[in-house]
Image (cartoon, coloured by chain):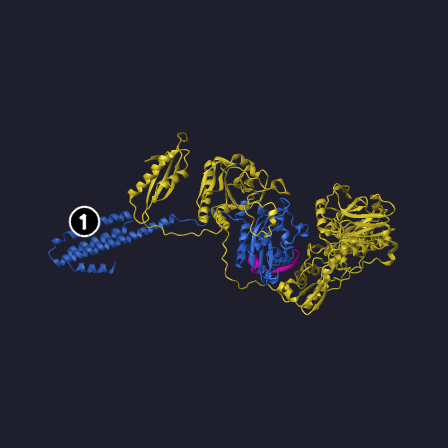
Amino acid sequence: MRISLRWLRDYAALDAPLSTLVQALIDTGTEVDDVHRDAEKAVVARVLELRPEPKSKHGVRHALIDAGREAPVHLMTGAPNVSVGDLVVWAPEGTRLPGWDQPVGVKTMFGVESPGFLCSAVELGLGDDAAGLLLLDRGVPGQPASEVLDLDAVLEVEVTPNRPDCLGHVGIARELSAALAEALDEPSTAVPEALESVSPVDNRVSVRVEDPAGCPRFMVRVIEDVDVGPSPGWMQRRLRAVGLTPINNVVDATNFVMLELAQPLHAFDLERFREAGGGGGGHARMTVRRAREGESILDLGGREHRLVERDLVVCSDERVVSVAGVIGGADTGVVADTRTVLLEAATWDGPSIRATSRRILAKPTDASTRFSRGLSDTLPPLAVDRCAALIAELGGGRVLRGTVDEHRGALPRIPPIEVTTATLERILGSPVDPSEAATALARLGFTVEQEGGTLRIGVPHFRRDVRIAEDIAEEVGRSLGYARIPATLPGRRRPADELAPHPPLEEAVRDVLAGAGLDEAITYAFTARDAAARLGGLGGERTPIALRNPLSEEWSVMRTSLLPGLCGALATNLNRGLGDLALFEIGRAYWEGERTAPPPGSTPDGADSALPPLPEEPLLLGMVSQSGDGRADTVAARLRHLQSVLAFTGHDLAGVRMTIEPEQIRGLRPGRSGRIVAGGRPVGVLGELDPEVLDGFGLRGRVAVAEVRLDGLVPAAPRTPTFAQPSNLPAVQLDLSVTVPAEARMGTALEIATEAGGPLLESIEDLDEYVGDPAGGRKGWTFRLTFRAPERTLTRAEAQTGLEAVAAALVTRLGAEVRR
Amino acid sequence: MSPDASAAEDTVASAGDEHLEDLHTLGARALDEVAAASDPAALDEVHNRYLGRGDGLISSRLRGLGQIPDPAARKQIAQSVTALKERVEEAIAERRRTLERGAGAERMRAEAMDLTRPAPLLGRGHLHPVTRCARELRRIFGHLGYTAVSGPEVEYDRYNFELVNMPPGHPSRDVQETFWIDDARLLRTHTTPVQIRSMIELGAPLRIIVPGKTFRRDYDATHFPMFHQVEGLCIDEGIALSDLKGTLLYFARSMFGPDRAIRLRPNDFAYTEPSLEVDVSCMVCAGRGCATCRRSGWIEILGSGMVHPTVLRNGGVDPERYSGFAFGMGIERIAQLAYGIEDGRLLFENDVRFLRQ
């Protein structure tokens, strides 16, 4: 919201430097995003020379001015009131003037480049006199104009949701006057008797509120014999200063009062309002209710909006003419020949306005923003009187006697709050002086009765956010300044029944992966709808959870696997000329319908059981490893590398051995994919990307991938290793070479060998694989077998017997032939 | 020449002259040849020639001794020959060491390395800045006794909003644009729901931090639909706002340097009362004012406050007995400030040139 400094000064002196005011707002909780001083670049200049431009028919003159620069500045001016020697204000190129969208530029007139211009009072936002230049009675050339003129400044402030009262200048002035200990002079809101007519308002309008919860208060006044016309200069300046375009004296008055008191108002043309409802007899019948199915309204731009049953509407008799706080109807507004103004000020249910405005409006309006936050029902009487008086004053009309006030939904009054300074001290952790606290609260509009350390606090009508002792602590804390509160670390003696927490195991996994040369990626948890169908990863055939309001098709569903996201990250790198790299990610996927128990910390009332269950969120580890040369063996080496990483992770962190069961997995290359099994349970997939999938993700080269479920693999508490003493007894190592059918699997061979080797076979190591002529249908393996007896020296003959047993088992069970 | 050797020489001189003269020359010749040997092979030759078992020029002298009649002279000559043998052996060993040293030096010269040549990079991968920053946060708060916990990322509206004092229609919901799955379920917009879940699960007293993913329907140069937060919650008897201030000062200094100051500004969050925005003095200009802090000297880093009594109650914690503070910060933002990452978009591109730093 924009706040004009000069406007604020209508209500409090506030003559401290601008920076002090800004700091005071920031310190008390109103964020100031930006400060623009009007005409900041404008300077004082002395007119040195004036010469008429012969081609000008309107008396444009060449002026040479001394603006404190090295050389005089040459520019053009059409002002008649200036003479040589006068002190004037020059707005050079780039000066921002109040109410101007663009900074001042350089204009070419009569073939002369005229940099900026000399200003009138209107251009500086200082008055109504546009006829001639503003002549100064003091100042030296080059001096900033702001030092000799009372130029306005505009603050861009951000008001927190709990403070709708600060969405008006009076509210901000109150904050500042409290912070700076100055008096606040609130505007009078009574309608002066001179402006009031004897004729009662009831003659012209009646109001029926059908939904008092949606509309706690609805107030109306009527102003007759209004001459619609432009607002006076002072009001136009106020509105322009905060970025509003003046329209006419009636509309401007409603905007002015909204920007002053934070209460939006709406002005109807009473005759047009009445006609819209088809009514006669000079009497307007206003009905406030929820919209009905099928109703719609045309906005001022002529666009039709369909209404839903939640929308609050104002009707002329039965016909909807405006949507509360959101749209004023096209055919009932104030126009040039309006004579009778029907002025509405209401309190609406915030959530209803919020829902309607979010559905209908592209962006919130000044009124919808204020109503959405839930304004106090004490504001309409102030605003409607203030505005009616202004309209009558500016438009020469008279306010009908009395107000229609439908207030059946009156909001509960906020009861007084009683707090002790002990309570405030307990919350703030700092000593609180009761009189100081009482003074601070009083400046903010609270009434305070102090009795020793007890404060009995009456909450002002506009502060519906203050309800409990903690709210008072905030008011006191921010008034006294949080800088005064000491910085302490909490601690107290507690029973020692806790255990030291373990660092999460996923962090150890991250270290393993980074140590193994993979870089960590973090990709979005949403993917394209078809990503899972192309590359299911560990998510397999699961249907992803769709977002109801996604940002784009690319991010429309929750991922069931990390692999599509990682392939996307890989593609980004490849497109930037990088390659031969490996990425990993650890994060959750989302599997609908698979959560077996509600998450920890569910409310004991069982309220969740009526809701659709939350999805399972497995913690996955995904890896992708790309080689650019397109060769089968280099990508095979990368796939083997991923296997090594997984084996290490499984062994060292989880104490489990992972095995691979070859299987055709969607998106992965036939013959190069499999399922990872640990402890008899499938925990992951790995393989090489299918060429088609590769294309689909915009990848080049060849890519090895793997994905495992970490929370299915790694225990909650880390594995505690046990360390055994290495044997000092000698081992016997023997090599065994066999040929086997080409389709034989080494995993099977190792299982057979381990079983056949007996207890003396300590380990079996794969030394070599030889794939000779594929047409021959066989391949060769060489193993190194290590035999060792636990408590004695093993003889070579015993080891040889073990080797023979292994060989025999491989021959009979795998069709191996031993090569001697 | 060793003192022992010269003593032997004197003894030899006083015995039979001819014999001794001969042995003397032989010894001198042997030692000359040892000194002249230029490589280990030549030295081996010298060794064989003089000391070779049986037929070496020196060692063979011991063989004809039996013909010398005088036992005293015999003994003396035997001693002289043995002494000479030892002397030559020693000289050979010494020469061999010298030669080896020389050869070693040569080899060292030949095998010298240019250590200024850049070493090949360690084939290590790198952790994402968000991970590194989260670890840093875990370390800092771990020292204060906070345990890291987690909660669901797909949450119920109840936990994300209602139970933390943001009922439907609450104006604060506007600043947290939400991704919805259905009427009841959403992607959590903050890690705050884990406050409620932890209070219910673990009870008071409680000190937790919650690092995790959060989602808001917002996407531009500085807002991302997914980001990471760390929530902190401390509940105990007698927790005051001063404790919040002290804890966050400890955090700010540990994270951004010992000279940092913090500033608390009033704000409004539904789940805390009082609510505070926390600024840290600018780490770029040390508070003097620069582009990073938009000339203010302060940088906003997190939101915090004293846990609202209603939120405590919703978590099953008695607000009459316990009080607490909570805070929440964006890990990306902290990482950007701590690591000087000006453009936050880099954090989601996964460009390895960025990651490998």
- Left or right? Give the position of A369 relative to B100: right
**A589 above or below A384?**
above
Q: Return the x and y of residue B302 as percentages of the image width and height.
A: 61, 55
Residue at 84 percent of width and 43 percent of height: A278
Q: Which residue is mark 1?
A: B54
* Residue B146, above or below A817: below
Most distant residue in the bottom direction: A452
Q: Is residue A737 within the magenta segment?
A: no
- Provide the residue span drawn in magenta: B250-269
Disc 1 sits on a residue from what chain?
B
As drawn, the chain in yellow is: A
Q: Position of residue A456 (x, y in %)?
A: 70, 65
Q: Nearer the viewer, residue A647 or A86?
A: A647
Q: Chain B takes which shade in the image?
A: blue
Residue B337 percent coordinates (x, y):
59, 53
Image quarter hosting the C terminus of chain A: top left
Report whether B304 appears left or right of A115: left
Q: Considering depth in this image, is A514 or A795 the residue closer to the camera?
A: A795
